[in-house]
Amino acid sequence: MPGNITSRRGDGRRDFLEISVLPDGDLFVKVMETNDDGKIKIAHVEFCTSQGGGYHPKTWKALDALRIAMKEDNQDPYSPERYRQEIKED
């Protein structure tokens, strides 16, 4: 999926959250979890901008703030490397 992608591994280390900003400004949120057998489960949801027909402007703004916070955590030199290994930022 094209766009600016920011991801962050969870504290459980078997899951991670990815938030993508699509070219039209929509936010695509993906949660991935690795099962005991090594298979990955994926769930995702898309939030459109208000100009693109979205009905959740406060949720969109909060998710974008979360994306920015994740990006800042990924750039923090004191953040453990194991949490930053899934970075896929443009």
Image (spheres, rainbow, N blue to C red):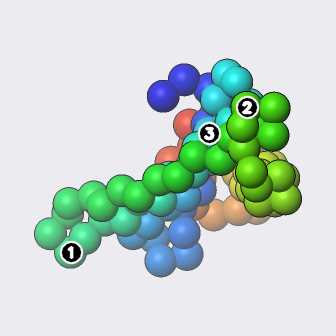
Q: Amino acid at mark 1?
A: Asp
Q: CA distance from mark 2 to mark 1?
A: 39 Å
Crowding at dot 1, Cα within 10 Å, few <14 / some 14-19 / many 20+, comes out as: few
What residue sits 47% from the left and 59% below the top?
A: 31
Find disc 2 in the rendering and name its residue.
52
Describe the element under mark 1 as helix, strand or loop. loop
Helix, strand or loop at disc 3? strand
- Left or right of 9, for residue 42: left
Horizontal side, residue 38 vs residue 74: left or right:
left
The image quarter containing residue 39 is: bottom left
From the image, tell me which residue sits under label 3: 20
Q: Which residue is mark 1?
A: 36
- Whether residue 40 sits left or right of residue 78 in the image: it is left
- Residue type of the residue flagged with mark 3: Ser
Residue 72 appears in the rendering: no
Q: Position of residue 26 (x, y in %)?
A: 68, 36
Viewer-closest of 9 and 31:
31
